Image (spheres, grey):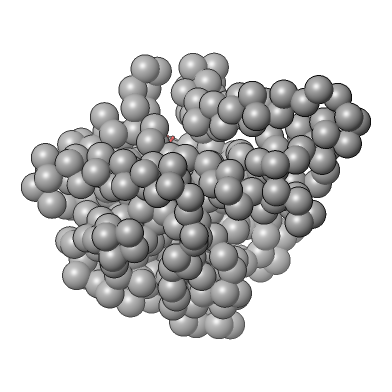
Amino acid sequence: MNNLNPKVSIIGAGNVGMRYAYALTIKGLAREIVIVDLDKERLSGEVMDLSHTAPYVSPVEIIGGDYSDTVGSDLVVITAGAKQEVGQSRLDLIEANVKLFKKIIPLLMQYTPEAIFLNVTNPVDLLSYVSYKLSSKPSNEVIGSGTVLDTARFRNLLAHHVGVDPRNIHAYILGEHGDSEFPVWSKAMVGGVLFKDYCPKCCRRGESCSHQEELGKIFKEVKDSAYNIIERKGETSYGIGLALVRITEAILNNENAILPVSSLMQGYLGIKDLYLSLPSVVNRSGLDYVLNIELNEEEQKSLKNSAEIIREKLNKVGF
Ligand code: NAD
């Protein structure tokens, strides 16, 4: 890893790729950002526009390039591919995007095989596994953005409910980044207080607290977020853009940050040979290790359910 001049390549200059590129530029985490897209005309416009941030940010070279320009990347972030349209689930994108990944991954292996691959394209867990298989890279170097975004949405809504800073909420959405994801209520905390037993806001007031019901509503809102946003504006991009910056920071700065990224399951609760999100230590090696979080019976069932759904879909596309 090139510590002095970190190089990040972004595959796909669409909504997600460009929001990430913008946030990454502002954060000053990379000295070189290469952006690759099939649509060269649009790409050159995006790069011109983004380059005009130069006087306000740390020095960074922004290049609209081709796969050959990704050589020597520390990190490659893959955002290319079909996105959900209104009424589509993430899983509906699998066939189109597997075809695309069969082209993209060999090119990345040709030009920048040492980079950490961070996949964002949906269905993210399936395509992260497909990337791992197609690349034959060590599994720690191929991760997916997983439920990092869903967890941010969850922490934000819980924080609003209680009226505290979202950064003080410790809570996770785990499993599939998709319809079978689930909240880990058994461990969700604010300031050391378990939400499931006591809502620091409602219970403190001594109100007849319906917080179990409230918490159910909060999770439903998290789960439906992408559908609700896509219905209104056609795509989701700000939240994922910054979630990707958070993962990038953990990798490039060797932070050992705990993030629910998607990674290869190696036997936790008997789940193997597919990608899912569990809290994981992320650093310069990519994924250092997965924390085998203690889940209650219902949460364990939910995780196994996510695994079954993902395995069935992977089988259907021949992986
Ligand atoms: P978009 O349509 O705006 O952008 C996709 C881009 O990929 C396009 O610019 C297209 O030209 C490009 N592309 C296609 N084939 C390519 C190739 N072979 N090489 C290089 N570029 C290529 O879509 P978007 O809104 O940016 O979404 C991108 C993906 O990210 C979708 O699959 C979406 O579902 C996913 N997404 C994931 C999360 C998450 O949390 N994991 C969140 C939001 C969106």
Q: Residue furthest right?
A: 205
The one of 221 and 239 positioned closer to us in this rendering: 221
Instruction: Kindly identify the residue that appears in the image at 9 percent across and 47 percent down.
Output: 318
Find ligand 1 in the image and state its quadrant.
top left
Residue 299 at what x, y percent from top left? Answer: 45, 45
- Quarter where residue 216 is shown: top right
Q: Is residue 153 left or right of residue 312?
A: right
Res 104 visible: no
Looking at the image, residue 54 lies above or below residue 49 = below
Q: Is residue 53 left or right of residue 101?
A: right
Looking at the image, residue 317 lies above or below residue 25 = above
Looking at the image, residue 229 lies above or below residue 52 = above
Instruction: Kindly identify the residue that appears in the image at 51 percent across and 74 percent down.
Output: 283
Residue 107 at what x, y percent from top left? Answer: 22, 62
Residue 280 at what x, y percent from top left? Answer: 48, 65
Instruction: Kindly identify the residue that appears in the image at 52 percent across and 50 percent down.
Output: 148
Looking at the image, residue 11 lies above or below residue 85 = below
Res 205 visible: yes
The one of 58 and 276 positioned closer to us in this rendering: 276
Instruction: Kindly identify the residue that appears in the image at 82 percent across and 31 percent down.
Output: 202
